[in-house]
Image: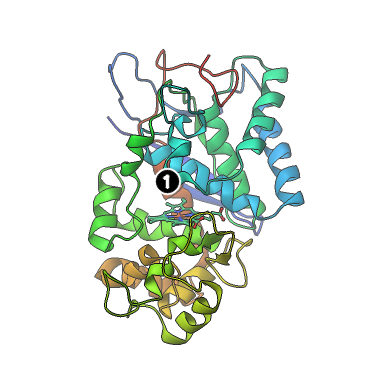
Amino acid sequence: MAAAATVRTRSLAGGVVPVALLLLVLCTGSSSAAGQLDVGYYNKTCPAAEEIVRNETAAAVTASPDLAAALLRLHYHDCFVQGCDASVLLDSTPNNTAERDAKPNGSLRGFDVVARVKDRLEQACPGTVSCADILALMARDAVSLAKGPSWPVALGRRDGRISSAGSCGELPPLHGDVGLMVQAFAAKGLDLKDLVVLSGAHTLGKAHCSSYADRLYASAGCSTPDPALDARYADRLRMRCTSPYADDNSTTTTELDPGSSDTFDTSYYRHVARRRGLLRSDASLLDHRFTRAYVLQAASGRYDGHFYHDFAVSMAKMAAIGVLTGDQGEIRRKCNVVN
Ligand code: HEM
């Protein structure tokens, strides 16, 4: 079931851009229990909710600007694995290894900020605002605090009670080609445009050597460094990552969008267009006719407004993946443990 809603998104320049957002209303599990997400869902039950989230996120991002990237990525990793149900926030237990302890989630950050926001919301409106909604709001606020667009977030998600490291295979593979990326997105109801637009999130943040060092060296699997990577850029990266077998615990990081990794803009696409996309997934966007055309258009710098609009639309789609609503799941009192 899908429902279209017309909403408005605010551009950073202060203007308000009307946007037709296709808000996917997902039926998960028993259809009778599935409901709809609504912009303004907490207007009556917790009117200060969005303001509390915004203020706490602003305080955290002002103190540490690189947290904006972390918060955006947390929401993505939540939604792609078992839907946007805050399962990524749950701690492992003696009998269960949770998502957050799975290898692809090893460098996720920002859990403490989310916990702080949840505590504030529990003081204001106990048992009302879900951790899954908090992640969606914080991702939106993080982007706008990083000088990116803002958009209305449809709310009403409930929190899941299950989190399993084994489910993290639902994330797009780190070393996959564009075909595998397309497949991983399609499995979540997201299309080619969502792939190239949401990859633009890599305008923020950093990556560890272990995420791309294999592209820099000939190795058992590859007889040459990745030919898709600009040779001069690869030389510079090899000075940072001195071994193809980068240790997962290595603390050396490199900006995904060199020079503006705390600012949400289109310069990521300029790097990708010049074959300087840091991750294999970034580089692979040049290997498909559609995604390549989008990269080149965004890289021109003449379509920033289009990208901001597209990003808001694709984020709304991502934020609706596999949501729990109605009487499904629960509203956790603490985001890291089930009630
Ligand atoms: C297309 C498939 C994607 C792949 C294969 C991918 C992979 C990665 C990897 C490997 C890192 C670096 C992790 C590290 O070394 O610490 C990263 C960072 C990041 N990703 Fe993605 N990603 C993808 C899509 C997305 C999407 C859809 C979003 C959000 C909408 C996103 C947001 C981010 C952010 C903000 C960072 C920086 C995190 C930080 O600085 O802590 N990514 N991604």
**Front residue (pair 139, 17):** 139
Disc 1, ligand 1: is the CB inside 8 Å? no
Q: Is residue 328 visible?
A: yes
**Front residue (pair 85, 229):** 229
Q: What amino acid is found at the position of numbered circle 1 in the picture?
A: Lys
Q: Can residue 39 be seen in this view?
A: no
Residue drawn at x 48%, y 16% is 330
Task: From this view, report whether residue 73 is shown above or below residue 339.
Answer: below
Give the residue pinned by disc 1. 103
Return the x and y of residue 194 as percentages of the image width and height.
Answer: 36, 53
Return the x and y of residue 110 as percentages of the image width and height.
Answer: 61, 42
Task: From this view, report whether residue 223 is shown above or below residue 50.
Answer: below
Position of 170 with respect to 54 (left or right) is left
Task: From this view, report whether residue 14 is shown above or below residue 232.
Answer: above
Dot 1: element? helix
Q: How many labels does the image show?
A: 1
Residue drawn at x 64%, y 32% is 50
Position of 337 with respect to 329 (left or right) is right
**Front residue (pair 104, 202):** 104
Position of 31 with respect to 333 (left or right) is left
Return the x and y of residue 21 as percentages of the image width and height.
Answer: 42, 44
Return the x and y of residue 51 as percentages of the image width and height.
Answer: 70, 33
Position of 138 with respect to 176 (left or right) is right
Task: From this view, report whether residue 83 is shown above or below residue 214.
Answer: above
Residue drawn at x 60%, y 37% is 111
